[in-house]
Amino acid sequence: MRKKPAHKTRLVHTAGNKTVTRTVPVEGSAAAGVLINGVTWATCNVDAPGTFAASPESAGMFYQWNRKLGWSSTDPRIASDGSKTWDNSDIFGDNWSAVNDPSPSGWRVPTFDDFTKLLDEDKVTNVWTKQHGVFGRKFTDNVSGASIFLPAAGIRCGDGSLDLAGSQGDYWSASSYFDDAWLLYFYSRYVSEDSYDRGYGHSLRCVRAE
C-alpha cells in the first residue's frame, strides 16, 4: 500500500472572521520538488516502487537499471515484492522504459542530460557534506540558492552484496551507454557522470515529468 504523504497546515489569508488555510506537502512527500538549473528534482530518493523515502538523508531502495523491483539498502537483502533472489539475467533496452519506471506518479528517472545540468559548475555548486549524520553531496542552484541533498547510500554489487555505504553515491540515469548505462557517481573528492554495469543496484533520485 502506498504511504500517504505527510502534510502541514499553513495560514494563507484572514478576512474578518473567516480564515482561509491550505494544506501543503512537507519535505519528502510525493509533491516535494526543487528547481535547479531548469530541472525540478525530487527532495528524496525513490523507496519502494511508487514511493519516496522518508527523508532527504534516507537511502531508499536500490534498483537494477530498467527494472522496477527495488532492493533493500541494508542487510538482509529483500526486494520490494518480498523476494530474496538477486536477478543476474541480462538487462536490455536503449532507455529506461516508462513501464519499468519505479518513480512516483508525476516523476521519472533522470536522463544523462538532466545530470549534465546538475553538474554545470557555472550554474550549480556541489559539495561533499554531512547532513543529519549522513554523508553525501549537496547541489545548490547558484542563482536561487535552492538545493538538494543526495546521500552516499553505497551500492549493491553484481552479486547483490552491499558495498560502500556512507562513502559513495551512484544514481542511475535513464540513458544507456552500449551494454552499460549512465549514472551520477560521487565520493568525498570527486563527482562525475560515468557508465556502469546495468546489473548493479544503485540509488534513484527522480525529476518532475513534464
Image (cartoon, helix red, strand yellow):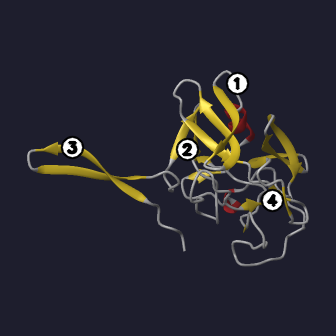
Callout 1 crowding tier (Cα within 10 Å): few <14, some 14–19, many ≥20: few
Sequence-wise, the earlier of marks 4 and 3 is 3
| Mark 1: amino acid | Glu
Give the x, y percent position of residue 201. Answer: 81, 59
Instruction: Depth check: give the residue in front, 129 or 23.
Output: 129
Cα separation between marks 2 and 3: 31 Å
Give the x, y percent position of residue 152. Answer: 74, 49
Pointers 1 and 2 in contact (C-beta within 8 Å): no
* Front tag of 2 and 4: 4
Sequence-wise, the earlier of marks 1 and 2 is 1
Callout 4: SS: loop
| Mark 3: amino acid | His
> What numbered label is drawn on residue 13?
3
**Residue occupying the point 76% across, 49% down:** 172
> What numbered label is drawn on residue 121?
1
| Mark 2: amino acid | Glu
Pointers 4 and 3 in contact (C-beta within 8 Å): no
Cα separation between marks 1 and 2: 24 Å
**Residue occupying the point 54% across, 36% down:** 35
Instruction: Depth check: give the residue in front, 152 or 41.
Output: 152
Sequence-wise, the earlier of marks 1 and 3 is 3
- Image quarter of residue 200: bottom right
